[in-house]
Image (cartoon, grey):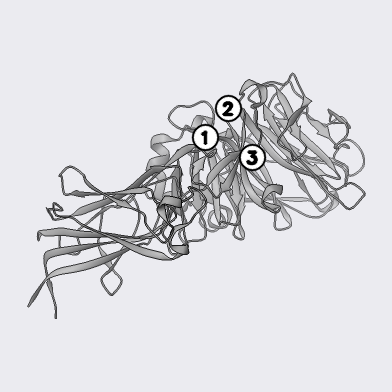
Amino acid sequence: MTERNRFFKHVFGGGFASDFGSDAETILAGNNTVVIPYLVDAENLVYDLDGGPIKSPGTTKLNSSAVESGAYVYGLVDAWFSGTTGAPVQKRVIHAGTKILKDDADGTFDDLFTGLESGKIPSYTMLEDLLIMTSNSTTDVPKSWDNSTAQSLAGSPPNFAICTTHKNRVWASGNAALPSRLYYSASLNGADWTGRGSGHIDIDPSDGDIVTGIRSYKDQLIVFKGPNIGSIHVISGNAPFDFAKNPLVTGVGAVGHNSIFNFRDDLGFMWADGSIRSLSATAAQGDFAQGALSAPISKWIRTHLNITKANQFWAANNDEYGHILFSVAINGSATNNYTLMMDYRFSPVRWAIWPAYLSGCVASVVDGDTNNRRIIMAGGVDGFVRKYNQATGAIDGTGAINYKWTTPFLNYGNPIMLKNIEQASLSLVAENNNTLTLGWTRDSNAKQTVNFTQSGNAVLDSFTLGTDALAGGAIIDLWTEMTDGGEFHSIQYQLSESATTKTNIHGFGVSITGGGWSTA
């Protein structure tokens, strides 16, 4: 006997993967559940732990007026000064235009330094209540600020471009005259570069590369070189008498200092081809591009990423939500104008693209307005610093976030036989009463669409947008008949929404007739 109708529930088994093709085998997980192995696009969304694609969080402006008449904010750091009273003080420091500015955790930015070379790539580190700020400018010298005095860094430092703190010292590199030299300050003194305990280590000089990134990791200092040959080195030891350099791998390195990031129990970095990799996998596999974290989106990277500007890209760990945000330049832009999202709670990691978020730089920052939770803040291209992780589904409260995901074509196990789609459902948490559009494309036919309106137990004539959450957070199923669904061999689905509200999808279903399924 042949069963003429079957309902399929669909769940999400993967994220955005541009390299996996437009067709996928239908994977049945029992009880007519179809596991969608990946998405062919995933815009402005994050993933719930069940794999459901949820609209990415909204933003709000930190500063009420643009700094420097709307200048591009190309650097951001969360600086804390311990002081002597047992009450650390927070400052947010940014690079914008030709200035370094700071706020007093109040969103009002004041000048620290003026007259700098605009648009250079900044680097920051803190040691002994001294914030050290530098950039890859060959004319500007490293700066310091102790929450009182802002000045050029004392102690006759080299004109370094990147810096970090490790073993109670400031480590630095990027001196244009000695691009493979790694400097270290005296112990507990980031302003002493010539006294006892200070020194330098040369990292394979004249190998065709420069030191591009340094990061303290698991009691060692990891030194990256690039962008031509690529190599990674490990500095071990606790003091100058036992500091030692050991090569880790050749053929890959980091393209920039600010796109190195910690995640899980690992260290991630971006290479000169735009690929995003992990230190543990690189140590095990060497220069193996297919082992990169970004392997599923290599085609997207090759098509869109402006890798000639990759040394200015930023990465930040949104630890509470388990994803990394990357501020990058795409489609020929000379400055960062796009955001990528990597969710590392899954294995393999899941990707999404965030075209709604124009971030010049990103950083993890403690937010006093949300009970001192750590969130992502981003320097904008318009003179504003923005707080991510906001509960609203809008950019700065008013700009709609265009949410969309698209499945590969599915054939339900039999690409030869004709099937017919008759009904569809969405499994969601009804957050509001906005409209969702489900589209389906049958073989080479034009896309067809049907609208769903979220519904729940709030009284619609007293519904408060952005405040009421319909259905009390429970997952509900919305159904619709598809009288003109049509016949297909393979079919692709797409869900989109363009509102200033939240969208919380966990799955969808379709009722299909035909296909020759057996009841045996």
For the residues labelled 1 and 3, the Cα–Cα distance comes to: 20 Å
Residue 380 in the image: above or below residue 440: above
The answer to the question of whether label 1 and label 3 lie on touching residues, with beta carbons closer than 8 A, is no
x then y, percent, for residue 72: 60, 26
> Residue 100 sits in which quadrant?
top right
Residue drawn at (40%, 38%) of the image: 302
Which mark sits nearer the N-terminus, 3 or 2?
Answer: 3
Query: 10 Å neighbourhood of mark 2: few (<14), some, or many (≥20)?
Result: some
Residue 251 visible in image: no
Q: Nearer the viewer, mark 3 or mark 2?
A: 2
Residue that mark 2 sits on: 382
Q: Nearer the viewer, residue 86 or 39?
A: 86
Distance CA(mark 3)–CA(mark 2): 24 Å
Q: Residue at x 19, y 64 (%)?
A: 413
The first of marks 2 and 1 along the sequence is: 1
Q: Residue at x 53, y 40 (%)?
A: 397
Helix, strand or loop at mark 2: loop
The residue labelled by disc 1 is: 358
Residue 106 in picture, x, y percent from top left: 74, 38
Label 3 Cα crowd, 10 Å radius (few <14 / some 14-19 / many 20+): many
